[in-house]
Image (cartoon, grey):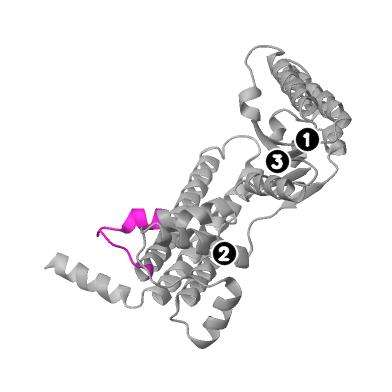
Amino acid sequence: MLLHGSPGTGKTTLCQGLAQKISIRLNRTYKRTKFIQIKTATLLSKFYSQSAKQVDEIFTAIGEICEEDPNQFICILIDEVECIASSRESSMHGEVQDSLRATNALLTGLDRTKDHVNIIILCTSNMPSCLDSAFLDRCGIKLAVDLPRPVVQYEILRGRLQSLIDNGHIMSRASLPPYRDARLELDTDDSLPGSKLLGIVALINTVNSSSPERISGRTLSQLPGKAVLRYLDNADCDLETAFRFMKRNILAENVQGIQKRGSEVKGSSQVQRESTDDPGQNEKTTMITSNDWDVDRVLAVLGAIESLVDAVFPGWKALKRQRDQNSDA
């Protein structure tokens, strides 16, 4: 089975959960279940042909484990399998040739496991387009794991916040409701915790719409803890304060991202202008015009962010003007 998708979508976690489900479902047939996770980065070697040798040794050991105890079910997780299953069509010579040997060893090892009925091999990949066609052909099930939708975003944040509450890092007597209950609360009272968390999810997607990259599940799971650590200056933090910190962190990181992309666009435009005396002037002039349009787009997004800040923090401009007047005085 192959799970593929963008980084941070939870492919490895899904495989671990699937292994646990398998152990429960097959507990009448197999008395024990063993989970083995293989980090492919550790298999790569700077010495020629050593990577293929290590892959072969691993599958030899797996076969021995399956034969030693037929009453034990084996779940193998090969994380980031593209490291040892890259396309052989692009492997020609040098270090890439060693990668070809590793891919061949993997394919041979997979064929050897067909003799055992008490094993399942789970693989994850961030780059399915780089995988060898023969490896893909051996994967009986191929599933794409997409970035989280709003309902999943809510549940990820809810789970992380509830964990912080249970561990005493956030002080709250109220528990966060599931997504469906939060939607019902939003229609009746938008001041309840579930309604406010839905507002944060809406803010994430509004801000994220101006970014070329969508937010991953890993980033979402880190958001509550990172926001509290970044802005908390008192000993205690309640749920309302945590929500405020999360909104502040979302807006701050989005502005930083826009400024970074704007700087990259500006630098690209400057480089193109400095080289207009070279051949291909017309082509470079076109690139400058495109980059200038990107700068205008960034400025427009900054204006949208300012409007969003007005909605989240009303009166911030008046406070800023008052602070500036006090500084001038």
Q: Earlier in the sequence, mark 3 or mark 1?
A: 1
Q: Amino acid at mark 3?
A: Thr
Are dots 2 and 1 in contact, CB under 8 Å?
no
Q: Amino acid at mark 2?
A: Glu
Q: Earlier in the sequence, mark 2 or mark 1?
A: 1
Q: Which residue is mark 2?
A: 155
Horizontal and vertical percent position of residue 61? 73, 22
Residue 227: in magenta span: yes
Estimate how packed mark 3 is, as few (under 14), some (14 to 19) or many (20 or more) residues with alpha carbons within 10 Å: many
Q: Is residue 298 above or below residue 34?
A: below
The residues tagged by marks 2 and 1 sit, at their Cα atoms, a distance apart of 37 Å
Horizontal and vertical percent position of residue 215? 57, 56
- Work out whether residue 96 or residue 62 is closer to the camera in this orientation and state it: 62
Q: Quadrant of residue 328?
A: bottom left
Estimate how packed mark 1 is, as few (under 14), some (14 to 19) or many (20 or more) residues with alpha carbons within 10 Å: some
Q: Which residues are magenta?
A: 226-239
Q: Residue at 73% x, 15% y: name it.
A: 53
- Work out whether residue 73 or residue 262 is closer to the camera in this orientation and state it: 73
| Numbered disc in front, either 3 or 1 | 1
Horizontal and vertical percent position of residue 308? 45, 72
